[in-house]
Every structure is written in C-alpha cells, then in structure tokens.
Amino acid sequence: MTETTSKTIEIIVKPDGSTSLETKGFAGGECRVASEFIEQALGSRASEQLTSEFHQSVAGIQQTTQQR
C-alpha cells in the first residue's frame, strides 16, 4: 500500500502587511515549482528558509545517483 502525503501551500499575511509562504509535503525543489506563481504575485523574496523535507529529498537523490 502506498502512503500519500498531502501537499499544501500556506500564505501568512502579518498585521504589518508582510507575507510569508510555507510549503508542506513537497519533495526537494518541487516546492519551489509549486509556489512560483504565488511568489511572483507577492513580489520579490526577502529571504528563504529551507525545511528538512527539502534537504532529505536532495540527499536521497544524491545517494541514488552515487550507487549507480
């Protein structure tokens, strides 16, 4: 049986008008592709904080490539 993970994009608008975007359930750079249209609509990115989901996926891809 395959376990499915829910993918979500959360947009937070703070009282001062600034926004933040958080993706959940995406593997590696898939989150950047999924949220690109929202980032373009919100304007330029002030900072980026990558989650463990992003790094775990990248490590898994590198390990698979090295084993070939």
Image (tube, grey):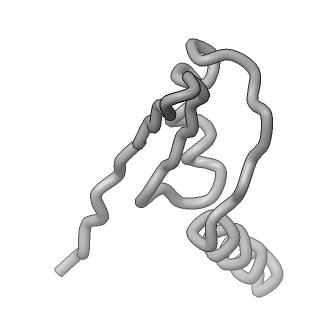
Residue 2 sits in quarter = bottom left
Residue 39, picture quadrant: top right
User: Outermost residue, bottom direction?
Assistant: 67
* Quadrant location of the C terminus in the rendered image: bottom right
Quadrant the N terminus occupies: bottom left
Residue 56 at x, y percent in the picture: 64, 76
Q: With respect to residue 5, does 15 lie above or below?
A: above
The residue nearer to you, when weighing 7 against 57, is 7
The total of numbered circles placed on residues is: 0
* In the rendered image, the vertical position of residue 25 relative to residue 46, given as above or below: below
Q: Position of residue 31 (x, y in %)?
A: 56, 46
Snapshot quadrant of residue 6: bottom left
Query: Along the line of sight, which residue is nearer the eye, 48 or 29?
Result: 48
Q: Residue at x 41, y 60 (%)?
A: 25
Residue sitting at x 35%, y 47%: 8
Q: Residue at x 75, y 21 (%)?
A: 44
Q: Is residue 23 above or below residue 52?
A: above
- Judged left or right of residue 21, residue 11 is left
Q: Is residue 15 left or right of residue 28?
A: left
Which residue is painted at 56% across and 31% down in the image?
Answer: 19
Q: Residue furthest left?
A: 1
**Residue 11 point in image, percent of width and height:** 44, 36
